[in-house]
Amino acid sequence: MTTSTSISRLSMLLCSALLLPLCALKAEEQPIPIFDAHLHYNADVWETLPPARVLEKLTEAGISRALVSATPTEGAERLYRIAPGRVVPFLRPYASRSGRYTWFRDDTIPRYIREHLTRIPYRGIGEFHVFGDDARTAVVMQVIRLAREHQLALHAHTDRLGMTAILEQAPDIPVIWAHAGFDVPIATLRRLLEGHGQLYLELSFREGITREGKLTPEWEALFANYPQRCLVGMDTYTPGRWVELIDLAEAARAWLRQLPPDIAAGIAHDNAQRIFRESNRKLTPVSGQQEN
Ligand SMILES: [Zn+2]
């Protein structure tokens, strides 16, 4: 018998004989596994957090898989290449932070997307920022057409008008609403969820989910009515958010634990896992250059 086996047998004996309540509590408090539906691996952390360290950090935070986008998108490609089973890469349609305010009028963007789609099997386009009628420009329409053509999801940081425009153009692909629109009224969320079977709410920074640490009745009811349509995300849009990753995941678990376990498991992990099953997509046949 090895030393570690002896120790684990000893601890089992202790559990059953002396520490039963403590052990039961521990089992109950096993961290809920998280599929993070909103991570960024932006250039500003590449030096301090190399890809291997990112994976360790995700493990420390109990995050088993993650939807990852980046500025520039090469960040998502770097992470995907070392951990294709854990990283669901999304293609951000602009290469610098300033692009987020202009991409939807930049007619070079569809070509930029097509070129990048040949590099790795991207699963979606986003997270992109667009608001109001800007979501109806010719460029946005082309980007949505590309997503449908390649069976990609969309990840949009937008308002009610923007989301309405996107859903009109994207009736048949998953659309993830970053931050669930921040403060868009719950009645509006319900109406859009009802009308569009593939709309998902990603809940980082969303207002109103808890009050003094307690889940609010309106969100508890929304989760009960749409248990398969909500996702958690940590949104590591700054280096500081990476530093806080474990705490952010714990904060999400604190309200998830107030839900029935099957609903919590869905929001924390299973819903995203269902959207992004491993075998959903293969790399688009390459017609351009392949990056090394
Ligand atoms: Zn974000």
Image (cartoon, grey):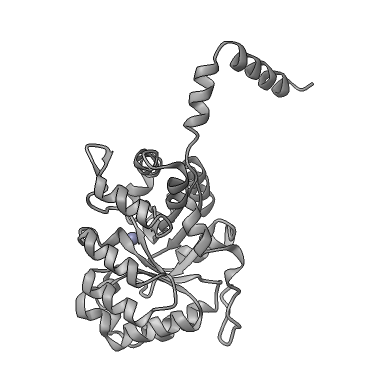
Residue at point 48%, 25% (across, down)? 25
**How many dots with numbers?**
0
Task: Identify the residue at the far right of this view.
Answer: 1
Q: Is 216 located above or below residue 203 in the figure?
A: above
In the rendering, at what x and y percent does residue 12 appear?
64, 19
Q: Is residue 126 above or below residue 67?
A: below
Left or right of residue 182, residue 84 in this image: right
Question: From where the camera sits, is residue 49 visible?
Answer: no
In this rendered view, identify the residue nearer to me: 152 or 226.
226
Residue found 52% across the figure and 61% down from its top: 274
Measured as percent of width and height from the top left, residue 189 is found at 27, 63
Q: Residue 96 sits in which quadrant?
A: bottom left
| Residue at image point 54% right, 14% down | 19
Q: Residue furthest top?
A: 18
Ligand 1 shows up in the quarter that is bottom left
Residue 16 coordinates in the image, percent (x, y): 61, 16
| Quarter of the C terminus within the rendering | bottom right
Residue 5 picture quarter? top right
Q: Nearer the viewer, residue 261 or 160?
A: 261
**In the image shown, does 71 or 227 lie closer to the viewer?**
227
- Residue at image point 27% right, 48% down: 209
Quarter containing the N terminus: top right
Measured as percent of width and height from the top left, residue 162 is found at 25, 74
Q: Is residue 190 visible?
A: yes
